[in-house]
Structures are given as C-alpha cells and as structure tokens.
Image: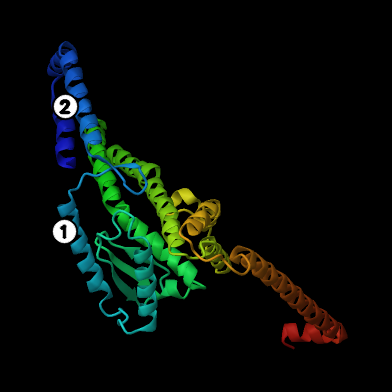
Amino acid sequence: MKIEERGIRKWWQALPPNKKELFKESLRKNKWKLLLCFGSFGLLFVVFYFTHLEVSPVTGRSKLLLLGKEHFRLLSELEYEAWMEEFKNDMLTEKDARYLMVKEVVNHLIECNKDIPGVSEINWVIHVVDSPDVNAFVLPNGQVFIFTGLLNSVTDIHQLSFLLGHEIAHAILGHAAEKASLVHLLDFLGLIFLTMIWAICPRDSLALLGQWIQSKLQEYMFDRPYSRTLEAEADKIGLQLAAKACVDVRASSVFWQQMEFADSLQGYPKLPEWLSTHPSHGNRAERLDRLIPQALKIREICNCPPLSGPDPRLLFKLSMKHFLEESEKENVKITAEKHKMDTLTMQQQKQIPLTYIVEKRTGS
C-alpha cells in the first residue's frame, strides 16, 4: 500500500500549477457529491458494524464478530497444530499425577456447569506442558494448555480450579474470535488513515513517523485496554464457574496477591497497567474481592457445603505480616553484625602504628 500512497503524493507533486488548480476547482464543484459518497460509505460501515454484532448468551453483552464459525474453527486447528509442534517434547503423559489432577479439576468444572451455554458443546482436551512458565491458555476449540510452572505457583486445588475456570470462560465467551474481529476492524480503519498519511505527508520520514504514532495509538488506546477488559470478564465468569463447582472462591484473590508479592520479592519492575495486556495482579485481586460475595451466594444456591476454616485471605495477610516482621528482624540482625565488624576493624586499625601504615602504602 505504501507504494500506491507514495505514488499518489508524487503524482500530485508532479502536476503543474494550472492542473492543480483545475483539480481543486473540480473538487469544489463536486463537493456535495463527494460528501454524499463519504456519507454513504460511513452509513454502509455503520450498517455493516451493527449487522455483525452478536449478544453473548452468558453475559448478555453485544460483541463484534466478523469471522464465520467455520473459518475461525479452521484457524483454531492451525493454531493448535502449531502449539503441539512447539511443545511436543515437553508434554506430560496422561499417567502423570499432575496431568490427572488437572483433568479431574476440568472435568469437575465442566460437569457442574453443563447448563451454561457453550460448555457442553466444546470437546475439552487437557495438555500439561513441563515448563517453568507461570501460564495457561485455552484455544477456541477446547484445547487447554497449562504449564507446570503455574501448577507450582498455586497453593491449593481451589486456586487451580479458579484459574482453569478463567481459561474455560475465555473459550465459552468467544474472546478469541471477538479479539480477532476487533483487530480486523482496526486494521481496516488504520489502512484508511495510513493512506491519508502517505498521500499527504511531503516526505517519507514524516509519513513513517505518522505511521508509527498511529500504530502506538491503536495499541495503547484500543488493543491493550480491550484485552484487559476481556481478561476481567473471564475472571468474573470464571469465578462463577468455580462457585458452581463448590470451590472456595475466596482463594481466587489470594492467588493474585501471591503473584504480586512474588514479583516484588524477585525485584520485577511494577509497570503501569496501561502498558500491559492484562490487569495488574493487585487490581485483579481487588476486583475479585468485590465479586466474591456474589460468588458465595452462587455456592449457596447450588447447595454447596458451607466453607469451613478461616478465610484464606486473612491467613495470607497474617502470613505476609509474619514474613515481613521476620525479615525486618533479620535485617536488623545483619545490620548489627555489620556494625560490629566495622567497629572491630576500626579498633584494629587504631592499634597499628602510623609509620607502619605509611611504609605499607609506599612499599618501603
């Protein structure tokens, strides 16, 4: 496209002044026709947009879907084959205890949520990847990938159930198709904008700068915020799926508090949320805490047994308080030992004759 756009600019620059004036005059005479054309195009775009909206049966939210189900199914199969090729040497066997644990949790979640639209229609398949990455994802065709690094990061089956519920929610909500549709729409609008940039800008360097600015604006004003919105929605629906499976939903926010604490211990920089495709760990924990009362009511409606024992959120706070107190004591102890060593060193130096120090420094 850049070649055509640059060609338009060069064509305009090569026109003699009289032809430029004739062209401008023609535009002025036909401005209403041009406005009608642009208006018709805008109307067609609006009609196209609203005729491709679908309402989610789970959330009731309208979403844009540009790709046909069969087309997207083929894309999902290609993506699945690519992931299987990448992880083919790292897959745990179906006899591995960790694989069996994940499979049991997923089957329990599916069994308890069969009434949710989309859950029973998908053939769920488990893949556990032996990798230290703290990650999990699900493909639209029900292929669930979870890494052993994530299994090592959860403290109990309740946290794991919530995280798998989150991934299942992505699939039944059709987030992948929705995000792909948004990308297609933004790419189309961006193409129109880029055509204008390359046709109008007098130099290629300015056009490249404008293109870079346009791509960053699209990324940080649309792509990433939309991705964070979908993640928050998957957290909400995933929490509801876990609640119907009689999971201790209070453990959900504890996991993200643990992740935030682990990042701080390892010295990872805390980036602003707007730079990320996911909500920050702290914000996710706070949002889940606000949703937990509703999830607890869902547990009651589903006749789940009452939760016993103290609130895991309280236990986590107490354990963190104890950890910080012990760390402070250790720091004080280390500081005292260092001060003691420094004092002994100074006392030893005072006992050494000055002439000896001078001789040692001069090498005499």
Q: Amino acid at mark 2?
A: Trp
- Mark earlier in primary sequence (1, 2): 2
Q: Identify which residue, 298 or 351, lies in the foreground.
A: 298
Q: Residue at x 44, y 62 (%)?
A: 242
Q: Identify which residue, 25 or 131, lies in the foreground.
A: 131
Q: Quadrant of residue 17?
A: top left
Label tally: 2
- Decide: is 14 above or below 355: above
Answer with left or right where residue 112 lies relative to residue 40: right
- Whole-angstrom CA distance, mark 1 to mark 2, is 44 Å
- Measured as percent of width and height from the top left, residue 104 is found at 37, 74
Q: Residue at x 49, y 64 (%)?
A: 304
| Quadrant in which the C terminus is drawn | bottom right
- Measured as percent of width and height from the top left, residue 91 is found at 30, 78
- Measured as percent of width and height from the top left, residue 142 is found at 27, 63
Residue linked to disc 1: 74
- Measured as percent of width and height from the top left, residue 274 is found at 46, 48
Answer with left or right where residue 221 lies relative to residue 13: right
Residue 198: mark: none
Residue linked to disc 2: 12
Q: Secondary structure at mark 1?
A: helix
Q: Residue at x 28, y 56 (%)?
A: 118
| Quadrant in which the N terminus is drawn | top left
Instruction: Tell me if I can see residue 198 in this picture.
Output: no
Q: Residue at x 36, y 57 (%)?
A: 169
Q: Amino acid at mark 1?
A: Leu
Instruction: Tell me if I can see residue 46 in this picture.
Output: yes
- Decide: is 265 above or below 356: above
